[in-house]
Image: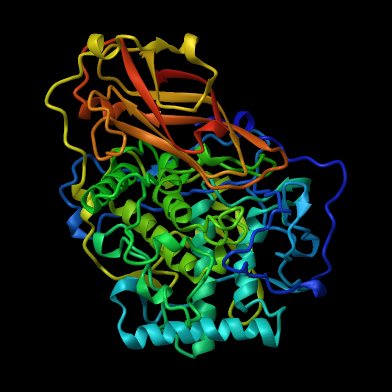
Amino acid sequence: MASLQSSCTVLGTTAPKPRIPPTSAKPSRHLLPNARRSHHRFHVSCSGGPGEEGKVDRRNMLLGLGGMYGAANLVSYTKVAGAAPLLPPEFKSCGVAYVGDDPLDVNCCPPTSDVIKDYKLPPVHRLRVRRAAHRLNQANVAKYKRAVKMMRDLDVSDPTDPRGFSQQANIHCAYCNGAHDQVGHEGLDIQVHFSWLFFPFHRWYLYFYERIMADLLKDPTFALPFWNWDHPKGMQLPGIFDEEDSPLYDPNRNQDRRPPAILNLALNSTIIDPAQIISNNLSLMYGEMIGTPASATDFMGKAYRDGDAPPTYPDGGTSEKGSHTGVHAWFGDPRNEYSEDIGNFYSAGRDPAFYSHHANVDRMWTIWNDIPADYPKAITDPDYLDASFMFYDETKQLVRVKVADCFNHKKMGYDYESVDIPWVRSKPPKKAAAANIQDLSKGVKTAEKLFPLKLKKITRVLVPKPTVGKANEVLVLENIVTDNRKLIKFDVFVNDEDDKPEEVDRAEYAGGFTQLPHRVKAKNSKSDLRLNLKNLYENINIADDDSVVVTIVPLINGEAVTIGGIKIVEAPSA
């Protein structure tokens, strides 16, 4: 992945952002089903993704995956000179969240407090069990609806109550859309996507959200359901979120994707065969969880420290960039300019399904930690461990939390219902014979003749390899310039003889690029996409070739993408 410095634009400003007095806080406004916000130009600076402690004591269905589990279980990163952990935002300095240069018409700023406490995890007497949403019984559903209604009622009775539904939804907006500057860095946003902070931030977010609901219900056993989209039985919007008279309903979703429509993580709407969609989904899950990551930061996301520019999509981890983003994009409402609600960062928290979606994202972190791997899973860099955030707890107390305190979810008082994980058995079948590169490359141009490339159509390019045949290499798509206002998706295949881009459950699929619509302070973003090729070479049974044919397939708004170059490099040493 590209360095933060090379892949992100520093969001500097010459004048301070307008600051919103805390007394002006108001609930965020829902879009009507056909409403559009044409006057908004969306500003999101994004970062996220993390690491955790390793263990092999759970989910015996994962045994037999093969590979050496990281025996030492720790990986150290050289501390960057002068670097420091990201500090929690100063709530009293919270400002306007932006879409481009225009302020949002909602106030994402949380209430302020003169008292801030360092949070200590309370003793756990009984684990809360998060269950699959499609498996909830009527009593569980009724309790969940009642909890969300109570939070929505707080929006009316006291719009500044941090436990209210709108205040909770605005947390995501404030941490994603420029309302919070980095402490000591005026105009430089805090961003919680596309870095090693992605998993810890959202774990803490759901932790307090869940505890608030449990406190309102006076039921300490209450637990959020998770949206089990990694299993065929959960690959549609859970029915509890599709009842129009329910507090769990949000009208701002893609109406074509209501149940029983099947979630399509590949985001290829030309695929209509349900069996192919499910096969693609399971194969993509296998890739992002097992087949593609070669290090902890491959899965968790790149480093993000104090003073760093907000990272971009390619800096995120495989899970965040894959299934996480796929769900957001698939269900975002195309009737709204920026795919609100769940299809955009600033508005995603307005959809109750968002929290169950992220419960499953969090579950992916727990599962990944139990999967045997030949690399260490834990990140021990102090700038990661000491990074911190601020939230309001269930008593309305403003608290400071640290990344290091959220690695063990059971110590946080919850666990996940044990269900089958079919994607561990969904490795794409290995090709029996290597592609004939001489035949495949006939008429295919080299990068020098094609790039920079405006991605208007399927493009094939002949790319030289630094090492002949199987090797530990990385495919790099350089200087990808995208229009941040648009949903974008393209896929990448290597030595693809079958030429079936709708099938990403094949050995030749290398990965993809998905961008949710957003805006930084410039119209366009520039970044690099890095795709590990070691396992792919094994799966395609690559011959002793000194080059490969790379196929780039635009799926959504390819005309809004320009790729500056392409190359294959040796993978960095661990």
Q: Quadrant of residue 224?
A: bottom left
The residue shown at (31%, 72%) is 134
Q: Quadrant of residue 225?
A: bottom left
Judging depth in this view, the residue of 18 and 373 nearest the camera is 18
Residue 426 at x, y percent in the picture: 21, 46
The residue shown at (27%, 32%) is 500
Q: Is residue 312 above or below residue 33?
A: above
Residue lying furthest left? 432
- Horizontally, residue 325 falls left or right of residue 485, namely left
Q: Is residue 256 above or below residue 510?
A: below
- Horizontally, residue 36 falls left or right of residue 367, namely right
The residue shown at (55%, 71%) is 120
> Looking at the rendering, in which quadrant would you find the C terminus?
top left
Residue 200 at x, y percent in the picture: 51, 57
- Horizontally, residue 219 falls left or right of residue 158, namely left
Evaluate whether residue 35 shows in this view: yes
Q: Is residue 190 above or below residue 7?
A: below
Q: Is residue 48 above or below residue 10?
A: below
Judging depth in this view, the residue of 289 and 106 nearest the camera is 106
Evaluate whether residue 392 shows in this view: no
Residue 424 at x, y percent in the picture: 22, 50
Residue lying furthest front? 34
Name the image colouring: rainbow
Residue lying furthest bottom? 218
Residue 154 at x, y percent in the picture: 64, 84
Judging depth in this view, the residue of 163 and 433 nearest the camera is 433
For the image, the number of numbered tags is 0
